[in-house]
Amino acid sequence: QVQLQESGPGLVKPSETLSLTCAVSGYSISSGYYWGWIRQPPGKGLEWIGSIYHSGSTYYNPSLKSRVTISVDTSKNQFSLKLSSVTAADTAVYYCARKGSSTSPDYWGQGTLVTVSS
Amino acid sequence: DIQMTQSPSSLSASVGDRVTITCRASQGISNYLAWYQQKPGKVPKLLIYAASTLQSGVPSRFSGSGSGTDFTLTISSLQPEDVATYYCQKYNSALGTFGQGTKVEIK
């Protein structure tokens, strides 16, 4: 059974960098698939932040591209998100998910709330 | 960059009513379209993929149709447990862009 689990600080100060990790179990990241980050501000809709292919190629939402870095660590079977220069507008539940090249996401993490506040 | 536009943003209907939600893609996406149901505090649940294929375990009152740029999610007989927000998502690339969501309530 594939499982994804997000981890990272629940509180980040404005202007700092948000860092999250998604640990994957039950499947080797290096075997394939896109691995993505999605976020949902409180009371708002879902936003796809970006994805990384198992080969390391990255794809970012144009609206966030200048601030986002997604990386993968195949030795630990996990991938990570960094979002720089955060503001209160970046407060959201952050999800990680697995997505095929032409299939919808089939496994999601439970999500982690990150609050941006001083 | 393909945009997904859903309508309406919210609706209120009576139990037993037929409910329809539409989703339009700014460019053709063939049938690479999924529909999700999300209840407060929960992870989105996949209802339909490939525009019209019902995910295993999803009640048959849910159905999807469309191809290209125009898609529809239909609930044939609205039930109290269907109160939720529904999202469409295109997945024909590495970025799985979502629609803005449609909040469904009981009248």
Image (tube, rainbow, N blue to C red):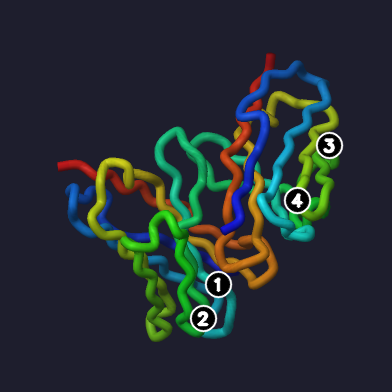
Give the labeled residue for mark 2: A54
Which one is in front in this view, the residue at disc 2 or the one at disc 3? 2
Which one is in front in this view, the residue at disc 3 or the one at disc 4? 4
**What numbered label is drawn on residue A34?**
1
Left or right for B78, reference B102: right
Residue A54 coordinates in the image, percent (x, y)? 51, 80
Query: CA separation, marks 3 and 4?
Result: 23 Å
Which one is in front in this view, the residue at disc 4 or the one at disc 2? 4
Disc count in the image? 4
Query: CA separation, marks 1 and 2?
Result: 6 Å
Give a yes or no on whether discs 2 and 3 share a subunit.
no
* Mark 2, secondary structure of its residue: loop
Closer to the camera in the image, A3 or A114: A114
Report if residue B10 is visible in the image.
Answer: yes
**What numbered label is drawn on residue A26?**
none
Residue B100 coordinates in the image, percent (x, y)? 57, 40
- Chain of the residue displaying label 4: B
- Chain of the residue displaying label 1: A
Query: CA separation, marks 1 and 4?
Result: 24 Å
